[in-house]
Image (tube, rainbow, N blue to C red):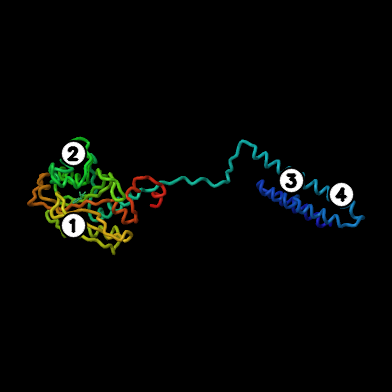
Amino acid sequence: MDKAINKVKTSFHSELESCKTSENLEQLRIKYLGRKGQLTDLFNQFGALSNKEKPKYGKTLNILKSDLTASYNNKLATFNSDQGSDDKRDFSLPGYALPKGNIHPLEHVTDEIKSIFQSIGFSVAYGPEIDDDYHNFEALNVPKHHPARDMQDTFFIDSDVVLRTHTSNVQIHLMENQDPPLRHICCGRVFRNEAVSYKSFCLFHQVEGLVINESSSFAEMKGTLEYFAKEMFGKDTKMRFRPSYFPFTEPSAEVDIWNDKLNQWMEILGCGMVNPNVLENVGYDSEKYQGFAFGMGIERIAMIKYGIRDIRLFYQNDKRFLEQF
Ligand code: PHE
């Protein structure tokens, strides 16, 4: 019996010493002072003692009980007073991770497109999002009342100023300001007054390309765009050129990329040899110079690359969408 009493006493005190939280302390209380705890055990053993032994152990057990209870209460008091203090900071807690921003998927794809073209000698140019009718249409061989204007539903600021409907306006600014040869791309926002749906939005992004020199050809343009598509979507990408029409290029084509996820061809760009009328409009000698141009939709490319089915997702700023990139 003496042994058992001593064991309870020493192990209680050493465990009490290592209690760090009030939860620890409560567990200790249950283990030793609880209804089924070790102290109760000792009192049960006491009941089985002979009448001769009882007085001695009765006293020892009572002393033990008050010792344990008092020590427990003291410790509890220190915990409570800690909690009551003004300084509730726990410097051992790990810090909060600060939320980190993401690069928008369109920005990501634009960067990739830029670096692919930069790697084959294109420079990056910029141009205005609000422009006059002349640079957005007329100089590009789209005179007023030309039916081709229907291809691009336009937001007018006034009768002569528009939100650019494509990045092709930058072709004109570039050629007005520089002599050939030219080898540029330009990325930016464009605006069209279209019905909003899963595949079209009133605002989207394009990358325009323009190459002007004395020797460029349709074959060189095809090679350039094929190189781009393989770099962008992988070596096994299926692409096709379709004959098309743009007033500012002749001949013209459109490029489709096979979208595995949607199981269909998706148009990603228009292209063609720069129409000699456009060259003449900026004062280039169209007998001497020739070139090709292309314009691609960045949203389309991002949709194919990431398997996104709804263009509107790019503009809703939904973190659940954006955090995936
Ligand atoms: N600007 C045309 C469009 O937005 C694309 C294009 C650019 C086509 C350059 C040919 C050459 O639809």
- 4 and 1 marks in contact (CB < 8 Å): no
SS class of the residue under badge 1?
helix
Query: What type is the residue that disc 2 sits on?
Result: Asp
Query: Mark 2 or 4 closer to N-term?
Result: 4
- 4 and 3 marks in contact (CB < 8 Å): no
- Residue at 88%, 57% in the rendered image: 49
Spatial separation of the CA atoms under disc 2 and disc 1: 29 Å
- Residue at 22%, 61% in the rendered image: 240
Callout 4: CB less than 8 Å from ligand 1:
no
Out of 38 and 115, give the one closest to the viewer: 38
Q: Which residue is mark 1?
A: 221
Out of 101 and 141, give the one closest to the viewer: 141
Spatial separation of the CA atoms under disc 4 and disc 3: 20 Å
Residue furthest to the bottom in view is: 236
SS class of the residue under badge 2?
strand
Q: Which mark is residue 132?
A: 2
Spatial separation of the CA atoms under disc 2 and disc 3: 85 Å
Spatial separation of the CA atoms under disc 2 and disc 4: 105 Å
Q: Residues within 10 Å of mark 2 (few under 14, many from 20)?
A: many
Query: What type is the residue that disc 3 sits on?
Result: Tyr
Q: Which mark is residue 72?
A: 3
Comparing labels 2 and 1, the label whose residue is closer to the camera: 2
- 2 and 4 marks in contact (CB < 8 Å): no
